[in-house]
């Protein structure tokens, strides 16, 4: 695994991929500023390198604001949770690229998917293809089951994430940074008028839509060995 700090080119690539739909964090700085002001982007790169080399995460990056948006105005309990944080550039492309890069995989040939630019395994693809062909030739219905876990990412304990990183032999500095990130992880709920007090949170991945699925899948796979032995903890059985 390439364990070096993110390069300026990688940071620049992440900024170029950002669109106007990427809202700024609580500091109000939009991505457009980094796109049009290369000197500011270089300054941001120095901050990233310093955080990476010193294995310390800024406290501002550990305090996302949670905003609840109702799916239906007539049903106030049916909400979509969105987070506003300062570490979007860290979570949208840089850290996920480090984690999902094929260099850290021991055997790409047996990888079961779930990673960008790596196809699913031949056995799994063949099983799906065979099932489709049988349903087609027999003129039978093909049922698809879609699993939707309630608050899936928000149910994973932080301690379990660290155990999974160790189990998958992630470099120690990656583990240290993730542990530092969760050590002072706080969350507040905001609306148009006010922000609640910061609350210490010990569960939930909370790392954005790019890295959270990777860690959730690894946490799910990591719970299977313990479950098969009958020694899984309550937090793992709930997952």
Image (spheres, grey):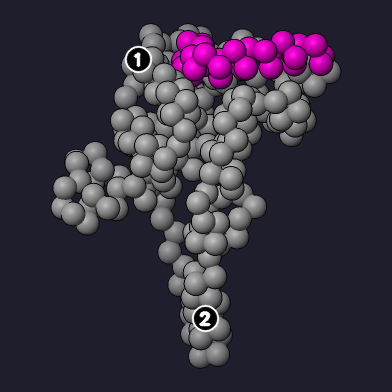
Tell me the crowding category of disc 1: few under 14, some 14 to 19, or many 20 or more residues within 10 angstroms, Cα based: few
- Residue 199 image label: 1
Residue pictured at 19% horizontal, 41% vertical:
233
Residue 182, image x and y in percent? 39, 22
Residue 28 lies, with reference to residue 90, above or below; the image says: above
Q: Which residue is mark 2?
A: 130
Report the quarter where the N terminus lies. Answer: top right
Across and down, in percent, residue 230 comes to: 16, 52
Q: Secondary structure at mark 1?
A: strand
Q: Tell me whether circle 2 and circle 1 mark residues in contact (CB < 8 Å).
A: no
Foreground residue among 168 and 193 = 168
Q: On the rendered structure, is 171 left or right of 161?
A: right
In this view, 49 is above or below 70: above
Name the residue furthest bottom. 138
Q: Residue at x 52, y 81 (%)?
A: 130
| Magenta-highlighted residues | 37-65
Name the residue furthest left: 230
From the viewer's side, name the closer residue of 11 and 75: 11
Q: CA distance from mark 2 to mark 1?
A: 50 Å
Q: Residue at x 51, y 86 (%)?
A: 134
């Amino acid at each position: 695994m390439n364990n070096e700090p993110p390069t300026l080119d990688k940071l620049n690539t992440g900024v170029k991929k950002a669109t106007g739909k990427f809202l700024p964090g609580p500091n109000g700085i939009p991505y457009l500023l980094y796109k049009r002001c290369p000197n500011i982007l270089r300054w941001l790169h120095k901050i990233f390198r310093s955080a990476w080399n010193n294995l310390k995460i800024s406290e501002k990056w550990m305090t996302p604001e949670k905003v609840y948006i109702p799916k239906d105005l007539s049903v106030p309990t049916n909400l979509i949770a969105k987070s506003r944080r300062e570490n979007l550039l860290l979570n949208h492309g840089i850290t996920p690229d480090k984690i999902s890069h094929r260099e850290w995989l021991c055997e790409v040939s047996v990888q079961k998917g779930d990673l960008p630019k790596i196809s699913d395994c031949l056995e799994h693809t063949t099983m799906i293809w065979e099932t489709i062909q049988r349903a087609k030739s027999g003129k039978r219905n093909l049922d698809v089951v879609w699993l939707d876990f309630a608050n899936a990412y928000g149910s994973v304990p932080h301690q379990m994430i660290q155990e999974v990183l160790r189990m998958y032999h992630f470099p120690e500095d990656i583990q240290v940074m993730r542990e530092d990130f969760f050590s002072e992880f706080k969350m507040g709920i905001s609306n148009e008028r006010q922000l609640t007090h910061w609350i210490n949170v010990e569960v939930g991945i909370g790392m954005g839509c790019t890295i959270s699925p990777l860690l959730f899948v690894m946490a799910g796979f990591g719970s299977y060995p313990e479950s098969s032995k009958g020694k899984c903890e309550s937090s793992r059985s709930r997952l």
